[in-house]
Image (spheres, grey):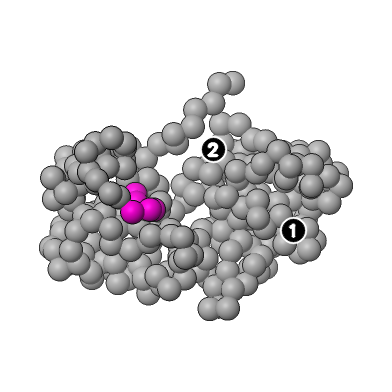
Amino acid sequence: MKIEDITRVLEEFAPLAYQESYDNSGLIVGRGDTEVSSAVVCVDATEAVIDEAVRLGAGLVISHHPIIFGGLKRLNSSCYVERVVEKAIREGVALYACHTNLDSTDGGMSHRVAEMLGLENLHMLESLPKGNGFGVVGTLAEEIEVVEFIRKVRNVLNVGAVRYSQPASRTVRRVAVCTGSGGSLLGEAVAAGADVYVSADFKYNHFLDATGLVTIVDAGHFETEYCAINLICEVISKKIPTFALHKSKESHNPINYLA
């Protein structure tokens, strides 16, 4: 099957027009008319993932994060980005990324994590002109203790360590979620009346800004975005059930925790 047949399905669900201006989603290495028999799906395209694709005979790697964000002036193995691109070209493995377009599409990343956490009645946290948006806000079926909910986040997302602010309330019913770096939407989470805001990459001042307004839970960038693998596989499998997809076993969090 041609790569463009696979990527067309993804782009019907998460149009490239939805990606942010700084992003680089789409086909990064390779040609759309190349025939492939299977694909490896991961969070980050790393050297280990390319090796995995070669072992599996997969001619395509679909990642959430684009391997290239800015322009490359040379390819001389001076950093992991260059090494990955070099290896992919050398091994004949195409690289495709589905990033902020997958984050912001209806039913995308934040919707998936919200559903995993048991949230209902979901609405976009920040609506954009094209009809897409970042983050969601929803409600739990029953009000629970805030610490109990934080434990649920840790367990459901398999987080090595959870950072959270001083609880703004004893219980939780309304929750906002934004996968990846969501500090910029803290104000939107407060305005939406969220008791808890689950996201990642919060800065020190975010924890101060949240005081008395909302409990922020930093559940990790990788952990909140790992759902991309299942989401991408489901989107493709629904339209092309015979195409072989491998959920990468080499897709690991680059951050380690010491308990």
Is 188 placed left or right of 159 in the picture? right
- Residue under numbered circle 1: 187
Q: Assign a secondary structure to mark 2.
A: loop
The picture quadrant where one finds residue 136 is bottom right
Q: Position of residue 165 (x, y in %)?
A: 76, 39
Q: Position of residue 206 (x, y in %)?
A: 73, 45
The answer to whether one can see residue 174 in this image is no
Residue shown at 72% from the left, 62% from the top: 188
Residue shown at 40% from the left, 47% from the top: 43
In this rendered view, identify the residue nearer to me: 234 or 72.
72
As drawn, the label of residue 158 is: 2
Tell me the crowding category of disc 1: few under 14, some 14 to 19, or many 20 or more residues within 10 angstroms, Cα based: few
Quick check: 130 above or below 31?
A: below
Point out the tag, 2 or 1, that comes first from the N-terminus: 2
The answer to whether one can see residue 95 in this image is yes
Q: Which residues are magenta?
A: 67-71
The picture quadrant where one finds residue 29 is bottom left
Instruction: Answer whether residue 69 is magenta in the image.
Output: yes
Q: Magenta region's main secondary structure? A: loop
Pick the quarter of the image with the N terminus: bottom left
Q: Position of residue 88 (x, y in %)?
A: 20, 47
Pick the quarter of the image with the C terminus: top right
| Residue placed furthest toward the front | 73
